[in-house]
Amino acid sequence: MNDLAVGQPGECVVRGPSVMSGYLDDASANEEVFRGGWLHTGDLLRKEADGSLTFVDRKKYLIKTGGENVYPAEVEAVIARHPAVQEVCVFGVPDAYWGEAIKAVIVPRQSQWASGPEIVAFCRAALAGYKRPRFVEFVASERIPRSATGKLQRHELAKWPIGDDQKV
């Protein structure tokens, strides 16, 4: 495998005696993750100047908009700093022109309020234009689909329809 330059994100691939040997009775999944003798984890990491690795995001969550790669975790970290935001999930939605557009689903803090345009304006200071959400939806926490362990289910949110009122 190829090492990447400092600051450049790439997929973590591993091999060795302690790496799993494969998925039981799932040849197609094994072909997908075991390429070239390496286990492709799906985790995107960035090598830091000191040699350490920083988790960036999951490869399957990567949003490709207008030929640019956007990591949802980066956008979520910015939006989460807004005082009216309790929780946020960012993902790509189909877009005829850009390929994918960025949508943010936000759970507001109790007795706090913000508008979609306010959230996008808040992002201007920290994110390039192509990384800002084009759609913002505010929902109650109990509407968010979660796994049995309470983890937000991004893939389920991505199935929700997009209303005209969500475009910013």
Image: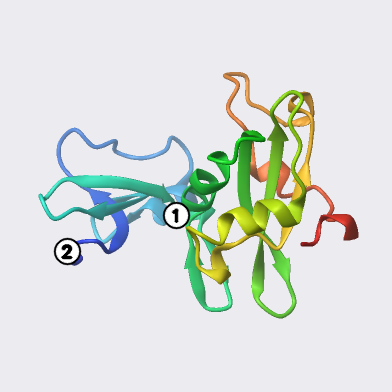
Q: Where is residue 166 in the image (x, y as percent from the top left)?
A: 82, 55
For disc 1, the marked residue is 59
Whether residue 38 can be seen here: no
Q: In this view, does 54 lie to the left or right of 128?
A: left
Q: Distance between the residues labelled 1 and 2?
A: 17 Å
* Amino acid type assigned to the residue bearing label 2 in the image: Asp
* Quarter placement of the C terminus: bottom right
Q: State the image coordinates of residue 164 (x, y, percent, origin top left).
A: 89, 60
Instruction: Report the residue that reaches farthest toward the left.
Output: 50
Quadrant of the image occupied by residue 7? bottom left
**Do we see residue 87 in this rendering?**
yes
Q: How many labels does the image show?
A: 2
Q: Earlier in the sequence, mark 1 or mark 2?
A: 2
The figure's colour scheme reads rainbow
Locate residue 37: give its quadrant: bottom left
Q: Nearer the viewer, residue 28 or 74?
A: 74
Give how far across and how far down residue 10 sits, in percent.
31, 60
Classify the position of the N terminus by image quarter.
Answer: bottom left
Across and down, in percent, residue 47 comes to: 21, 54
Instruction: Describe the element under mark 1 as helix, strand or loop.
Output: helix
Q: Nearer the viewer, residue 112 or 157?
A: 112
Amino acid on which disc 1 is placed: Lys
Q: Residue at coordinates 67% horizontally, 35% vertically from top-left?
A: 84
State the residue at coordinates (13%, 55%).
Answer: 49
User: Which residue in the structure is indicated by mark 2?
Assistant: 3
The answer to whether 68 is drawn above or below residue 121 in the figure is: below
Residue 107 is marked as none
Q: Residue placed at 48% from the left, 43% from the top?
A: 26
Q: Which of 106 and 44 is in front in this view?
A: 106
Horizontally, residue 8 falls left or right of residue 56, namely: left
